[in-house]
Image: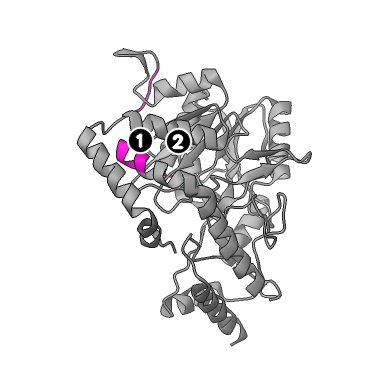
Amino acid sequence: MVDLKGQYGNIKDIVNSSIQEVIENTAFINGPKVHEFQKNLESYLEVKHVIPCANGTDALQIAMMGLGLKPGDEVITADFTFAATVEVIALLQLTPVLVDVNEDDFNININAIKKAITPKTKAIVPVHLFGQCANMEEIMKLAKAHDLFVIEDNAQAIGANYTYSNGTKVKAGTIGNVGATSFFPSKNLGCYGDGGAIFTNDDNLAHTIRGIVNHGMYERYHHDVVGVNSRLDSIQAVVLDAKLPLLDTYNKARQIAARKYNLAFKDLESITIPKTVNGCDGICDTCDCHVFHQYTLRLNGVNRDALVKYLNDKGIPCGVYYPIPLHKQKAYLDKRYNESDFEVTNQLVKDVISLPMHTELDDQQIEFITSTIIKFINE
Ligand SMILES: *Cc1c(COP(=O)(O)O)cnc(C)c1O
């Protein structure tokens, strides 16, 4: 699904020498390299504060801790996402309220959020799924009207732009009160281990969070709040710093690959190509709203599982993100849910398939993948 080795080949010299330097300087944790990366990411995202941490799941959890959410507070998030999002809500003894997503962009549905808001609702967690932002303009309006926090799960959309209806562009993850991202190796900006970060423009919240990631300490050995131990190490920071200047190029390579896939599939009735809803059509050359963490098709009247097997037999990896709606997962069952409220997610889990998507896909590979899929459909 990804080609991390090919990508490494192009940055090998700088990555190797910077890792060597970290080892020689022995500042493994919270060293100057972590700070340098933090500053560089702040300027790339045009956000006031980046707080690096150990992984994307921690980033979400720490964001929620920083906002002071209390047990019993309801937090609305999407039913169609990776479990990390709902997991941390539950871990903090907040009440996850899962809602349905849109058919076109697979992101959290605004009307479903409206329906789920109660006097206990305290936050919304939009997940910018597969690389494009949820409808942040409407989400921010709802949050304002109901006095809710917005925590963006930006693990899949780093570098994507969000375009407001007046044309203003901002980076994904910097719109809500706080954003969380992951640097897991296969993410659009991935390190060579685990890593994550929290973003915010709120000075007070940034201060609170900087203490939480470090055992609740604001002054050495003074523990003012209950914190965690969640740090990005210097080796991961130098890998990320080597890749950050290339992030736009990496995302562009993904967009170009997506465009080629789109052109191959766009006239097939049995395939719905991913829809870009914020700013462009996904086939244009100037797409900046979707960074294609995943390239995900919807199949119409095609046996998905047979196609997965057919592709695997031909040596083509593919994935199903996600095969089971979160509201049907044993850990997250809740009597409040009605199946009729999850029509879209219940259908998507049966129809979606994600194709290989990374920065090193070449024309020959894309041609082999698309022609194999078309052959299966025509058989
Ligand atoms: C990857 C991912 C996470 C978790 O990130 P980790 O670094 O693996 O903990 C959270 N949310 C979403 C949507 C993700 O894709």
Q: Residue 359: x, y in percent?
A: 48, 60
Q: Quadrant of residue 283?
A: bottom right
Tag 2: residue type? Answer: Ala
90 relative position to 150: left or right: left
Q: Residue 232: which disc? A: 1
Quadrant of the snapshot with the C terminus: bottom right
Q: Residue 197: which disc? A: 2
Q: Residue 42: x, y in percent?
A: 51, 32
The reply to whether the magenta stretch includes residue 151 is no
- Give neighbour class at mark 1: few <14, some 14-19, many 20+ (Cα, 10 Å): many
Determine if residue 308 is in view.
yes
Say which element carries label 2.
strand
Name the residue located 62 percent from the left edge and 52 percent from the top edge: 290
| Closer to us: 196 or 362 | 362
Q: Quadrant of residue 267?
A: bottom right
| Closer to us: 230 or 25 | 25
Q: Residue 291: x, y in percent?
A: 58, 53
Label 1 vs label 2: CA separation? Answer: 8 Å
The reply to whether the magenta stretch includes residue 234 is yes
Q: Residue 162: x, y in percent?
A: 66, 43
Q: Which residues are magenta?
A: 225-238
In the orientation shown, which residue stands out farthest toward the right? 166
Q: Mark 1 vs mark 2: which is more N-terminal? A: 2
Determine if residue 92 is in view.
no
Q: Quadrant of residue 141?
A: top right
Say which element carries label 1.
loop
- Give the colour scheme of this rendering: one colour
Q: Are marks 1 and 2 in contact (CB under 8 Å)?
A: yes
234 relative position to 164: left or right: left
The correct choice, above or below, for 316 with respect to 234 in the image is: below
Name the residue located 31 percent from the left edge and 36 percent from the top edge: 234
